[in-house]
Image (cartoon, helix red, strand yellow):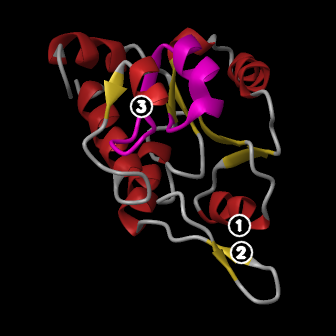
Amino acid sequence: MSTDSAQQVQQLANIKAIAFDFDGVFTDNRVYVMQNGEEAVACDRSDGMGISMLRNTGVPMVIISTEANPVVAARGAKLKLDVLQGIEDKLPTFEKWAAGHGLTIDQVAFVGNDINDLECLHGAGLGVVVSDAYPVATDAADLVLTRDGGRGAVREIADLWLAAHTD
Protein backbone atom coordinates (compact mmCIF):
# COMPACT_ATOMS: atom_id res chain seq x y z
CA MET A 1 0.00 0.00 0.00
CA SER A 2 1.10 3.53 -0.52
CA THR A 3 1.06 6.66 1.61
CA ASP A 4 -1.23 6.01 4.58
CA SER A 5 -1.18 2.28 5.04
CA ALA A 6 -3.25 2.20 8.26
CA GLN A 7 -6.02 4.25 6.64
CA GLN A 8 -6.07 1.97 3.60
CA VAL A 9 -6.26 -1.16 5.77
CA GLN A 10 -9.27 0.41 7.52
CA GLN A 11 -10.83 1.27 4.16
CA LEU A 12 -10.34 -2.32 2.97
CA ALA A 13 -11.82 -3.65 6.21
CA ASN A 14 -15.01 -1.71 5.41
CA ILE A 15 -15.25 -3.08 1.86
CA LYS A 16 -17.97 -5.71 1.41
CA ALA A 17 -17.71 -6.35 -2.35
CA ILE A 18 -15.30 -5.86 -5.25
CA ALA A 19 -15.97 -4.75 -8.82
CA PHE A 20 -13.33 -5.06 -11.53
CA ASP A 21 -12.71 -3.63 -14.95
CA PHE A 22 -11.41 -6.36 -17.28
CA ASP A 23 -8.97 -5.04 -19.91
CA GLY A 24 -5.87 -3.72 -18.20
CA VAL A 25 -6.82 -5.33 -14.87
CA PHE A 26 -7.23 -9.03 -15.63
CA THR A 27 -5.09 -8.54 -18.75
CA ASP A 28 -1.97 -6.57 -19.61
CA ASN A 29 -4.22 -4.45 -21.85
CA ARG A 30 -2.99 -6.13 -25.04
CA VAL A 31 -5.20 -8.03 -27.43
CA TYR A 32 -4.08 -10.69 -29.87
CA VAL A 33 -6.07 -10.56 -33.11
CA MET A 34 -6.09 -13.78 -35.11
CA GLN A 35 -6.31 -13.75 -38.90
CA ASN A 36 -9.94 -14.87 -38.68
CA GLY A 37 -10.76 -11.84 -36.50
CA GLU A 38 -11.04 -13.71 -33.21
CA GLU A 39 -9.39 -12.06 -30.26
CA ALA A 40 -7.37 -13.51 -27.40
CA VAL A 41 -5.84 -12.04 -24.25
CA ALA A 42 -3.34 -13.27 -21.69
CA CYS A 43 -4.39 -13.56 -18.05
CA ASP A 44 -2.37 -14.43 -14.97
CA ARG A 45 -3.25 -17.70 -13.22
CA SER A 46 -2.39 -16.17 -9.84
CA ASP A 47 -5.25 -13.72 -10.41
CA GLY A 48 -7.57 -16.68 -10.86
CA MET A 49 -6.36 -18.12 -7.56
CA GLY A 50 -7.00 -14.75 -5.89
CA ILE A 51 -10.58 -14.75 -7.21
CA SER A 52 -11.04 -18.32 -5.95
CA MET A 53 -9.78 -17.34 -2.50
CA LEU A 54 -12.16 -14.36 -2.42
CA ARG A 55 -15.08 -16.45 -3.67
CA ASN A 56 -14.52 -18.85 -0.76
CA THR A 57 -15.30 -15.98 1.63
CA GLY A 58 -18.59 -15.22 -0.12
CA VAL A 59 -17.63 -11.64 -1.03
CA PRO A 60 -19.71 -10.48 -4.02
CA MET A 61 -17.62 -9.73 -7.13
CA VAL A 62 -18.33 -8.57 -10.66
CA ILE A 63 -16.52 -7.62 -13.85
CA ILE A 64 -17.89 -4.43 -15.43
CA SER A 65 -16.36 -3.98 -18.88
CA THR A 66 -16.80 -1.40 -21.59
CA GLU A 67 -15.69 -4.01 -24.09
CA ALA A 68 -18.28 -6.53 -25.29
CA ASN A 69 -16.20 -9.55 -26.19
CA PRO A 70 -16.59 -13.31 -25.84
CA VAL A 71 -13.16 -13.48 -24.18
CA VAL A 72 -14.45 -11.39 -21.24
CA ALA A 73 -17.45 -13.68 -20.81
CA ALA A 74 -15.29 -16.80 -21.11
CA ARG A 75 -12.81 -15.66 -18.46
CA GLY A 76 -15.62 -14.54 -16.17
CA ALA A 77 -17.36 -17.91 -16.55
CA LYS A 78 -14.14 -19.78 -15.81
CA LEU A 79 -13.66 -17.70 -12.65
CA LYS A 80 -17.38 -17.96 -11.76
CA LEU A 81 -17.72 -14.18 -11.78
CA ASP A 82 -20.71 -12.11 -12.81
CA VAL A 83 -19.85 -10.25 -16.03
CA LEU A 84 -21.56 -7.09 -17.21
CA GLN A 85 -20.10 -6.06 -20.54
CA GLY A 86 -20.68 -3.56 -23.30
CA ILE A 87 -21.16 -0.93 -20.58
CA GLU A 88 -20.38 2.56 -21.88
CA ASP A 89 -21.34 4.40 -18.67
CA LYS A 90 -20.14 2.15 -15.87
CA LEU A 91 -21.28 4.14 -12.82
CA PRO A 92 -25.07 3.48 -13.09
CA THR A 93 -24.36 -0.21 -13.72
CA PHE A 94 -21.97 -0.28 -10.75
CA GLU A 95 -24.59 1.34 -8.50
CA LYS A 96 -27.33 -1.02 -9.68
CA TRP A 97 -25.12 -4.10 -9.17
CA ALA A 98 -24.21 -2.96 -5.64
CA ALA A 99 -27.86 -2.26 -4.80
CA GLY A 100 -28.75 -5.74 -6.02
CA HIS A 101 -26.45 -7.04 -3.29
CA GLY A 102 -27.94 -4.75 -0.63
CA LEU A 103 -24.93 -2.40 -0.78
CA THR A 104 -24.07 1.11 -1.81
CA ILE A 105 -20.94 1.72 -3.89
CA ASP A 106 -19.19 3.28 -0.90
CA GLN A 107 -19.09 -0.28 0.49
CA VAL A 108 -17.48 -1.62 -2.69
CA ALA A 109 -13.93 -1.44 -4.05
CA PHE A 110 -13.56 -0.77 -7.76
CA VAL A 111 -10.39 -1.91 -9.53
CA GLY A 112 -9.62 -0.14 -12.80
CA ASN A 113 -6.90 1.31 -14.98
CA ASP A 114 -8.13 3.94 -17.42
CA ILE A 115 -10.30 6.98 -18.13
CA ASN A 116 -13.50 4.94 -18.53
CA ASP A 117 -13.12 3.85 -14.89
CA LEU A 118 -12.87 7.34 -13.37
CA GLU A 119 -16.46 7.74 -12.17
CA CYS A 120 -16.39 4.33 -10.51
CA LEU A 121 -12.98 5.00 -8.95
CA HIS A 122 -14.29 8.27 -7.50
CA GLY A 123 -17.61 6.79 -6.34
CA ALA A 124 -16.33 3.55 -4.84
CA GLY A 125 -15.57 3.14 -1.17
CA LEU A 126 -12.05 2.31 -2.32
CA GLY A 127 -10.83 3.22 -5.79
CA VAL A 128 -8.00 0.86 -6.73
CA VAL A 129 -5.75 0.89 -9.79
CA VAL A 130 -3.10 -1.44 -11.11
CA SER A 131 0.50 -0.18 -11.03
CA ASP A 132 0.58 0.46 -14.79
CA ALA A 133 -2.72 2.37 -14.85
CA TYR A 134 -2.89 5.55 -16.88
CA PRO A 135 -1.96 8.65 -14.84
CA VAL A 136 -5.51 10.03 -14.91
CA ALA A 137 -6.75 6.83 -13.24
CA THR A 138 -3.86 6.76 -10.78
CA ASP A 139 -4.70 10.32 -9.75
CA ALA A 140 -8.29 9.24 -9.02
CA ALA A 141 -7.32 6.19 -6.95
CA ASP A 142 -7.19 5.68 -3.20
CA LEU A 143 -4.86 2.71 -3.62
CA VAL A 144 -2.26 2.01 -6.29
CA LEU A 145 -1.27 -1.65 -6.41
CA THR A 146 2.35 -2.71 -6.89
CA ARG A 147 1.49 -5.24 -9.63
CA ASP A 148 0.63 -4.51 -13.25
CA GLY A 149 -2.65 -5.45 -14.88
CA GLY A 150 -2.61 -9.04 -16.12
CA ARG A 151 0.45 -9.71 -13.97
CA GLY A 152 -0.91 -10.45 -10.51
CA ALA A 153 -2.75 -7.21 -9.66
CA VAL A 154 -6.03 -9.05 -9.00
CA ARG A 155 -4.22 -11.49 -6.71
CA GLU A 156 -2.64 -8.52 -4.90
CA ILE A 157 -5.99 -6.88 -4.13
CA ALA A 158 -7.35 -10.28 -3.12
CA ASP A 159 -4.47 -10.79 -0.67
CA LEU A 160 -4.88 -7.27 0.72
CA TRP A 161 -8.65 -7.68 1.15
CA LEU A 162 -8.25 -11.06 2.79
CA ALA A 163 -5.59 -9.71 5.19
CA ALA A 164 -7.88 -6.80 6.14
CA HIS A 165 -10.74 -9.24 6.89
CA THR A 166 -8.77 -11.67 9.00
CA ASP A 167 -9.95 -11.57 12.60
Magenta residues span 112-134
Under tag 1, what secondary structure?
helix
Q: Quadrant of residue 167?
A: top left
x and y, in percent, of residue 11 in the image: 34, 13
Upstream in the sequence, badge 3 or badge 1? 1
Upstream in the sequence, badge 2 or badge 3? 2
Q: Residue at x 34, y 56 (%)?
A: 152
Q: Which residue is mark 2?
A: 39
In this orientation, which residue lies closer to the viewer: 115 or 163? Answer: 115
Q: Which residue is mark 1?
A: 71
Kind of residue indicated by mark 3: Pro
Q: Is residue 160 left or right of residue 47?
A: left
Q: Which mark is residue 135?
A: 3
x and y, in percent, of residue 37 in the image: 81, 80
Q: CA distance from mark 2 to mark 3?
A: 27 Å
Kind of residue indicated by mark 1: Val
